Image (cartoon, grey):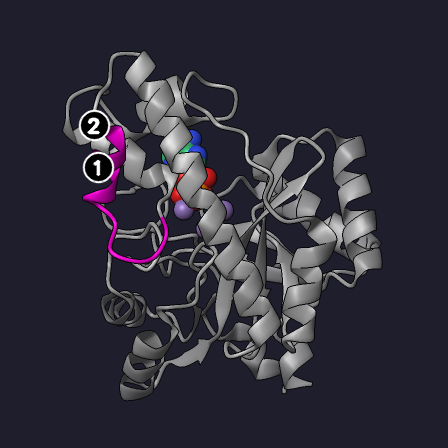
């Protein structure tokens, strides 16, 4: 029934199982306190937070959707593909995610080597000290650089060292777009392009991406990602219509210290959108 459309959805968030700051249970509690009614936990390349979050969501009467955010290499671009409402036990998906986590280990060593050459010693152990789950991410390196006074803000860690093309950036060959879509869909879920405006792709490239993604069986795109300009929302609404992709909405919340994204504060999807959740509710 249409009334579901107006529930408060947040289909993109992180816990300490990847690079978030709250435990899965804390995250669910916080989402609930912010008025979120349907939540997906979408940790990077891992679903380890699922069980704990699901138990807490059940206690609080919050609807909980399985999620993950998969690292993808598309041409020379790093993309994030969110998977929603899949079977977390699916063996092929879990094997794929395990491979991605393995790749993170080598990348982290290389990042630490580069930082050492720049005079910053102990970055690997330093970053690892902030890890609570099975993945080591650039966010953990950023925290190490920030807490040890190498940069004044977490953002500066990306701007100076860790961002694409910066001094300690290590390009990695993640999985392909087609493979990520296949893992998600064969696990019974729906693939969504996360924060499509954040890749700084030209309009031509973005159209190519939507076109390829749709042909591969991709289901949707994040029409609303966190706090974003209304112009971006309009633009993404138009793309979703044109490419017959469903619309998703997610805060990309990582925790209290990342003030650029909070929970429960996004506007609803524009009326012109076909919400992604229609695919598992219809
Ligand atoms: P990784 O998956 O290890 O490459 O790390 C990517 C994560 O770093 C993203 O999911 C964000 O949480 C964070 N991140 C990436 N770029 C920035 C940035 N410019 N400022 C702050 N955080 C960032
Ligand atoms: Mn992240
Ligand atoms: Mn992302
Ligand atoms: Mn994210």
50 shown above or below 216: below
The image quarter in which residue 156 lies: top left
Residue 80: horizontal and vertical position, in percent? Answer: 57, 48
Position of 65 with respect to 245 (left or right) is left
Look at the image and give the residue range highlighted in magenta.
123-135
Q: Residues within 10 Å of mark 2 (few under 14, many from 20)?
A: few
Q: Is residue 275 visible?
A: no
Q: Is residue 166 above or below residue 19?
A: above
Secondary structure, mark 1, is helix
In the depicted view, which residue is nearer to us: 23 or 264?
A: 23
Residue 14 screen position, x and y as percent: 37, 57
Q: Is residue 22 magenta?
A: no
| Residue 149 showing in the rendered view | yes
Left or right of residue 7: residue 52:
left
Identify the residue shown where x is 55% and y is 65%: 95
Q: In the rendered view of the protein, which quadrant contains the N terminus?
A: bottom right
Task: Kindly identify which residue carries mark 2.
Answer: 122
**What is the x, y in percent for residue 83?**
58, 64
Seen at 62% across and 30% down, the residue is: 200
Q: Nearer the viewer, residue 171 or 162?
A: 171
Q: Residues within 10 Å of mark 1 (few under 14, many from 20)?
A: few
Residue located beneath label 1 in the image: 125
Marks 2 and 1 sit apart, C-alpha to C-alpha, by: 6 Å
Q: Mark 1 and mark 2 in contact (Cβ < 8 Å)?
A: yes
Residue 133 highlighted magenta (yes or no): yes
From the viewer's side, name the closer residue of 250 and 180: 180
Q: Quadrant of the C terminus?
A: bottom right
The disc label shown at residue 264, or none:
none
Residue 281 location, quadrant? bottom right
């Amino acid at each position: 029934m249409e009334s579901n459309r107006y529930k408060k959805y947040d289909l993109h968030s992180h816990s300490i199982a990847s690079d978030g700051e709250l435990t899965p249970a804390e995250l669910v509690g916080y989402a609930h306190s912010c008025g979120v009614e349907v939540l997906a936990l979408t940790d990077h390349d891992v679903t380890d937070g699922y069980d704990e979050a699901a138990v807490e969501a059940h206690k609080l009467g919050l609807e909980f959707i399985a999620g993950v955010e998969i690292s993808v290499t598309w041409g020379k671009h790093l993309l994030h593909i969110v998977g929603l409402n899949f079977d977390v036990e699916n063996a092929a998906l879990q094997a794929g995610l395990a491979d991605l986590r393995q790749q993170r280990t080598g990348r982290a060593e290389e990042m630490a080597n580069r930082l050492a050459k720049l005079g910053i010693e102990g970055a690997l152990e330093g970053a690892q000290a902030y890890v609570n789950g099975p993945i080591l991410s650039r966010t953990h390196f950023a925290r190490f650089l920030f807490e040890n006074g190498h940069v004044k803000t977490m953002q500066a860690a990306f701007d100076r060292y860790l961002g694409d093309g910066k001094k300690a950036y290590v390009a990695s060959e993640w999985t392909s777009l087609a493979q990520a879509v296949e893992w998600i869909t064969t696990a019974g879920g729906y693939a969504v392009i996360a924060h499509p405006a954040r890749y700084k792709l030209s309009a031509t490239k973005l159209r190519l991406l939507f076109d390829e993604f749709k042909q591969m069986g991709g289901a949707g795109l994040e029409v609303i990602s966190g706090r974003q300009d209304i112009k971006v929302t309009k633009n993404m609404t138009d793309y979703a219509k044109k490419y017959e992709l469903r619309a998703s909405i997610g805060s990309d919340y990582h925790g209290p210290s990342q003030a650029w994204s909070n929970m429960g504060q996004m506007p609803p999807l524009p009326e012109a959108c076909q919400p992604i959740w229609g695919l598992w509710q219809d």
